Amino acid sequence: MTPLDETGGTVLEVRDLAVEFPLTGSVVRAVDGVDLDVAAGEIVGVVGESGSGKSVTMLALLGLVHRPGRIVGGSVRLRGTELAGLGPRELARLRGRRMALIPSDAGAALNPVTRIGAQVDEGLARHLPELPRAERQGRILDILRRVGLPRPDTQVRRYPHELSGGMQQRVAVAMGVQLGPDLLIADEPTTALDVTIQAQILRLLLDVREESGTAILFVTHDMTAVAEICDRVLVMYAGQIVESGSVAEVCAAPGHPYTKALLDAIPPLGGEPPEELTTIPGAPPDPRAWPVGCRFAERCPLRRRLGDPAECTSVAPAMATLDSRGSAGRRSRCHFPDALVEAVGGLVR
């Protein structure tokens, strides 16, 4: 293993990551050529429909893609250490302390036959064995209070099935943030929580970033939450990142038709609710046989607006810099991103 670089800067570097799941007579490439970077103290949102590859990408970063699935290509480096190809013991030493996961389904992630307090203590006992038990118990109660778990001194003696779904999720959040890891992957961390607790969890993620310099990948369907806490956003579709940039720039002037479609599908705040919510027509392509051209082409309103250019269905677009859009970090996987500048607000309707 390469020695870890403790100086800050880029925490995570991912290049050309690919993950496959073999099926009878075919192969599903769920993640196909993903590149991303996250700096220390940066919160990067990852958005997209269910099935876009968000969660599989995150599991791959942690070395948690289970057989028969496997990483078939690419590089994953955590502060200079190449993770792809590390053995289970080496990865276990990194998980929890250097990189951690807040799962989307805490009910499935928590051990049903172990008390809550003991589960939260597992990470402390493994990575900080020098701490006296009494100090660990104090830390457990403190982090459970910070995530909004009521009466933590009582809840630590309960089993997961004795807690509501929202309380289970708060326990999962506590387990992920308690050691201030270099990289925190938050996979739908506010699932099943009411708006008050959601706000509390988002505030906690900001606090973890400020206190520990933790780099956070925030996976979600909620663009409102992304706008609230994220510095940059990555938009995923059909196993690929199709747009990246600062949250402000992407929301103000999306550079990919899929991003615009996601933004147009957000119900307006205030005023009379619309009679019919905007949706994205069609369905994502079959991952067993990705299209030759743009993977969004069959659903793309911009393609229809431009008269069905041949490139859309015959040539796979590369991820390219948007020279005409704000900062140098703006990138899009679209043949005609600048055509969106002239698109009216009802493009996807």
Image (spheres, grey):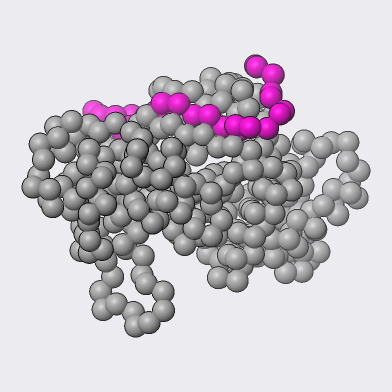
Residue 227 can be seen, yes or no:
yes
Q: Who's the residue at 40% across and 55% down the image?
A: 251
Residue 4 within the magenta-colored segment of the rendering: yes
In percent of width and height, residue 241 lies at 37, 39
Residue 203 drawn above or below residue 289? below
In percent of width and height, residue 323 lies at 35, 38
In percent of width and height, residue 280 lies at 25, 58
| Residue stretch in magenta | 1-29
Residue 22 within the magenta-colored segment of the rendering: yes
Residue 244 can be seen, yes or no:
no
Give the position of the C terminus as an image quadrant.
Answer: bottom left
For the residue pair 111 and 312, the one nearer the viewer reads as 312
For the residue pair 102 and 210, the one nearer the viewer reads as 210
Q: Who's the residue at 25% across and 74% down the image?
A: 276
Residue 195 drawn above or below residue 88? below
In percent of width and height, residue 138 lies at 86, 54
Q: Who's the residue at 82% across and 52% down the image?
A: 139
Q: Main secondary structure of the magenta part?
A: strand
For the residue pair 265 and 153, the one nearer the viewer reads as 265
Name the quadrant containing residue 194: bottom right
